[in-house]
Image (cartoon, rainbow, N blue to C red):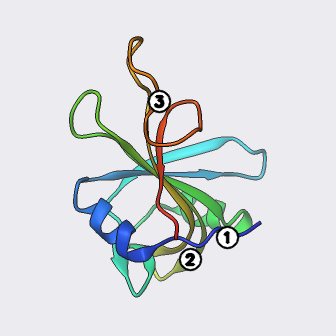
Amino acid sequence: MSVTVDLDRLADALGDFSYAYLVTVGDEYRVHTVAVDPVLTDGKLVVASVGNRTRGNVSAHPDVTLVWPPRTPGGYTLIIDGRAAVVDHGVRIAPASAVLHRKPGPDSPPTASSCGDDCVPLSG
């Protein structure tokens, strides 16, 4: 099932974060995670430069995840799943779904959605 990502909401949300982690998998499905600085360009997230392992993983297994950690404790984490393609020395990622997620404190009930935690889907 495909979920439409509201790119206007995504662009607004990206302003609250600095760097992200790009998560890929290799042929043995071992996770490879690197810190990156994606830029939203024409509806795609572009990472200008990545290493050989990341490019190889994307070529073989294009489904990836980007995770932006919260700037402050208790803040939201931005998580984007998408499909990546190798471009030059980097990758371009078409977002498939995006969510702002945080684990509420022990005395805080979920408020933004019914996902069991405090989640805000960024879809139309």
Separation (CA) of disc 2 from disc 1: 7 Å
Q: Is residue 26 visible?
A: yes
Residue named by callout 1: 59
User: Relative to 68, does residue 61 appear above or below in the rendering?
Assistant: below
Separation (CA) of disc 3 from disc 2: 38 Å
Separation (CA) of disc 1 from disc 3: 38 Å
Circles 3, 2 touching at the beta carbon (< 8 Å): no
Q: Amino acid at mark 3?
A: Pro
Residue named by callout 2: 86
Of circles 3 and 2, the one toward us is 3
Q: Nearer the viewer, residue 121 or 68?
A: 121
Circles 2, 1 touching at the beta carbon (< 8 Å): yes
Q: Position of residue 45 (x, y in %)?
A: 43, 73
The residue carrying pointer 2 sits among few (fewer than 14), some (14 to 19) or many (20 or more) residues within 10 Å by Cα, namely many
Q: Position of residue 92 (x, y in %)?
A: 49, 76
Q: Amino acid at mark 2?
A: Val
Q: Quadrant of the N terminus?
A: bottom right
Identify the residue at image location x=29%, y=36%. 75
Q: Position of residue 121 (x, y in %)?
A: 50, 55
Q: Earlier in the sequence, mark 1 or mark 3?
A: 1
Which secondary structure lies at badge 1?
A: helix
Residue named by callout 3: 110
The residue carrying pointer 1 sits among few (fewer than 14), some (14 to 19) or many (20 or more) residues within 10 Å by Cα, namely some
Q: Nearer the viewer, residue 5 or 94?
A: 5
